[in-house]
Each structure stands twice: as structure tokens, then as C-alpha cells.
Amino acid sequence: MAVAAFFPAMAAAHGNVALEDDICVRRVGGNLVHFNAYQPQYEAKAQYCTDIPQEGETFLVLDLVDPVLRTLPVGVRVVRGSDGSQEEQTVAYWPPVIHPDGVLRGEAHLSKGLYTFVIMPEGFSSSSYLLRVQQPDYGKISQKAIGPLMILLVVAMIGYELSKSRQWRSSEQGAGKF
């Protein structure tokens, strides 16, 4: 438990998570979808959600979890930037079609930066994921730094208290000599 307390990022794996707690799940018109990105040229079995570690060819997969969405035309647009509204910056587009198997698959070449993965189901408002390609995640960096910083703080406090007690003893011994 001490390791988990000092290094919370070690316990933040993606696999075997309940659907309600999965960070890759979104609601589209009250219906659940699940997003994954893959870059097998770098890591054969790794799956990513919104933080994609490398630029390059990326396989994007959207699972339509709720059966209602499988009967509606659903399209996807991948737009460079974080607002998802500029058409001229579209890097991938899959027109709305019905997906009876519940899976939308596509590929896009993503360079370093921010992208918006926009899900467009017919009859519902769109939903989106912000994709961060080869970007530092300061939240994760700070989580990883908390444990070592806490240990360093405790060691510094112990060192300070020890140095105070040694100074007090040496000043007390020095006062007794006069």
C-alpha cells in the first residue's frame, strides 16, 4: 500500500477497468461509445485513449457500445486542434454510415500536437475526444513526482531536526566549559 500511495501512476493501468470507470468511454446522446488508438509500428499490443505517445500512422477504433447507435448512421471527423470546428484542418473523415457490428475503424497520420476526434451520430448531438499526440502530460508527470518529492521532504525534515539537535548539544556542551 505504501508503494501505491507514493506512486499512484503505477496503479493507473487501462486494462480490466469497469466500463463506468474507463476514461475512454463517452456518452453520445445518452449512449456509450468506447475509443482506442493503436500504433503497432511502435508497440504491437499497446492501446491508447487520448494520450498517443508517438506521431505517425495511427489506427483509430470507436466501439458503439449501446445497440441503439448501431442502427443509426455514425460518422467521424479527426480535426487538427482542440476545438474541432475548422474544416480546413480535417485530417481524417469517415462519412456517416450504419455499423451493424458496432465498430468504426480508420487510420490517420497524426503529427505532434492536439487533435479532436469528433463523433457525429445522425439524430444526436456530436461528442468528441481530445487527442494529445506526443505531448507531455503534466498531470501524470506531477503524479509520478509526488512520491519521490514526499520522500525527499521527509528526509530533509529528519536531517534538519538532527542538525538542530546536534547544534543544541554542541552549544550546551560549549556553555558548560565557561
Image (spheres, grey):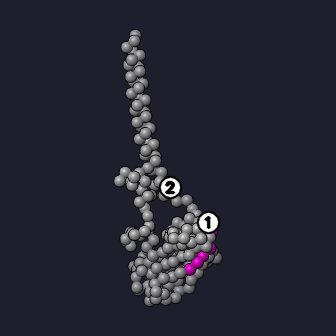
Q: Secondary structure at mark 1?
A: loop
Residue 89 vertical placement versus 144 (above, below): below
Residue 149 vertical placement versus 30 (above, below): above
Q: Residue farthest to the left?
A: 1
170 is within the stretch colored magenta: no
Q: Residue at x 40, y 85 (%)?
A: 67
Q: Which mark is residue 112?
A: 1
Q: Amino acid at mark 2?
A: Ile
Q: Position of residue 136 (x, y in %)?
A: 55, 59
x and y percentages locating residue 164 in the rendered image: 41, 28
Q: Quadrant of the C terminus?
A: top left
Mark 1 Cα within 10 Å, few/some/many (few <14, many 20+)? some
Q: Amino acid at mark 1?
A: Lys
Could you tell me how far apart the alpha carbons at marks 2 and 1 are, in whole angstroms?
Answer: 19 Å
Instruction: Tell me the residue that label 2 is attached to.
Output: 141
The crowding category of the residue bearing disc 2, from other C-alpha atoms within 10 Å (few below 14, some 14 to 19, many at least 20), is few
Foreground residue among 42 and 67:
42
